[in-house]
Structures are given as structure tokens and as C-alpha cells.
Image: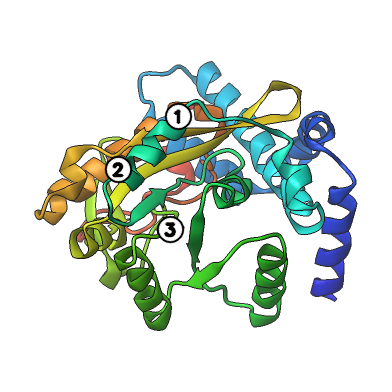
Amino acid sequence: MKLLLLRSLMRAFSWMGPRAAAMIAPLLAAPLWLLSARKRRATRTNLEAAYPQMDHRQLRRIAHASMVHYVRGVIETGMLWHWPPDKILRCFVESEDLEVLQAARRGGRGVIVAAPHFGAWELLGQYLHRHDLAAALYKPGRQPAIESLLLEKRVTSGGVMVPATAPGLRQFYRLLEAGETVMLLPDQEPSLGAGRFAPFYGIEALSSVLLPRLAQKTGATIVWAVCERRPKGRYRVRLFRAGTDLYSEDLRTALTAMNRDIERCIEVDTRQYLWAYKRFRTRPPGEPPFYGPSRHRR
């Protein structure tokens, strides 16, 4: 039943283009904001912690806009599932930052494109496949039937997906050592054994060690990417060079640089980041839970 509902929903969303999504998403986001206490609380808590200098009115505008962008991402998944890749690519403005990616490739080593959960991150791979992206890493889900369906649709649309499992990571290493370009999303909480604490917006956050370790072991160059939603149903990919400290052998230094670069990506448009994710769920030993009604400013 869930699969049928998911297929039907994505088919319905595929009938909308980006312009229609921009108009319809606010109508869907308003009741979602009211009905989803978990998303609302996480969004508000994250924003208040990241931007303590902002007044409540500013934070509320960003929070509501972030929920609209969350809904737009769901609608865009219908496009990803059912639109031909060329039709999706016609919605993109050519990136002015491609030289960053080209320069990384000229180094003669593999390239890791690191992409936070920002904007149309699901569509980012479509654009990068046009520029020789070999594969993208994904975290296997808890529901095999739904995961199989998601993989089927992503692969059909041109993506090569590699699971974040031991065999998948070995494949990722081989691609990088062969000089290929790969993509991963490094901005969410890993399991305790795969992460270390480092500051993110000045708050200790359990951060994935995979990105710096991949770069250290393969000599790959890191490039940051975001897919920004633009007016009139257009998308633009922004690319940034990684900070030099991200290549440090000291893991704390590297992870601090990684989180700083993620902040830099978010500042392209704060409203388009996935603030509803509980980024600070796991706390250092002795710290109280981060999420709860008592944290909110009134």
C-alpha cells in the first residue's frame, strides 16, 4: 500500500514543473508546518542555535521558507522519477563556477563533490552526470522495498548509486584511485563509530569522518556544490573550493574545516537548507538533550 501511494504521489508531482512547484509548495507547507510538531520544533531549535543574533521575526521567516523548500524538494522528486534527464537539464542555468570542478580534475587525481542537503540536492546529480560524475554515495534505508524503488528511479534517471556499506565504500575508493569524480552528502549525523564531534555554527556536532578520510587515503580533491533554486523555475549549481584545513591529518582540524565549508554553502541562501533535520541529536557525554520545547525563545 505504501509503495502504491508513493508511486501515485510521485506521478502526480511529475505533472508539475518547477514554476508550478514554487506556487503550490507554500500552500502545502502551511498545514505541514502546523501538523508536524517534530519538524517545526527541530527547525526552530536549529535556527535559534545557529543564528542567536537574529530576532524572532527573522528566524520565523527563514523557518517557514525552509519548510516551503522542503516541500519543493518532495515535488522535485516526482520530476526526478519521471522526467527525461534532458528535460530536467533544460531547467538549469549553466554554472558560472565550472572552472572550480575543471581545475580539480586537472590535478590528475579523483574528485569528491561534497553536497549538503541544500536546495534541489536531489537534482544536483543530474547536472553533474552531464559533467562526468561517476557515482554518488547513499545511505541505505530501513525499508528495503521502498529503498529498491528509490534506487530503481534514480538509476533510470541516469544516476549510479553506491551504498555506504563496506563493499560500497571499497568501490568508492577504487573510483577515486582511478581518477573519477564521485559525490557524497556529508552534513548529517553518522553513527557514533563513524563520527567525531566538531563545531558546526559554534555547537559541537557529531560529524562524519568519511570525507576527510577519503581525501587523505586517495589524494582526491574536494569540491563543494549546492543546487540553488532560482526564480522562474530555474536552478543554478554553485561550486566552491574546499578550505585547505579540510585536508589536515588532524581529524578535529579537518572536521572543523568541513563544517565551516558547509556553513559557507548554507549561506548561499539560508532558507534553502534542510533545517528540519535534527543535526545536534547526539550530544557529547554529559550534555543534556538538545531538542525540546524548553529551548525555544518565546
> In the rendered image, is residue 118 in sight?
yes
Q: Where is residue 105 in the image (x, y as percent from the top left)?
A: 35, 47
- Is 256 positioned to the left or the right of 55 in the image? left
Against 113, residue 189 (above or below) is below
Q: Position of residue 171 (x, y in %)?
A: 40, 76
User: What residue is drawn where x is 14% and y is 46%?
Assistant: 253
Query: Which residue is at a point 51% across and 36% down the rendered structure image?
Result: 44
For residue 8, which quarter of the picture? bottom right
**Total marks drawn?**
3
Q: Where is residue 249 in the image (x, y as percent from the top left)?
A: 10, 55
Dot 3 falls on a residue whose secondary structure is: strand
Q: 191 and 8: which one is in front?
A: 8
Q: Distance between the residues labelled 2 and 3?
A: 19 Å
> Which residue is the site of mark 2?
259
Quadrant of the rendering where the N terminus is positioned: bottom right
- Mark found first going from the N terminus, 1 or 2: 1
Q: Of the residues shown, which amino acid type is indicated by label 2?
A: Asn
Q: Is mark 2 on a helix, strand or loop?
A: helix
Query: Mark 3 = which residue?
Result: 182
- The residue that label 1 is drawn on is 97
The amino acid marked with disc number 1 is Asp
Which residue type carries mark 3? Val
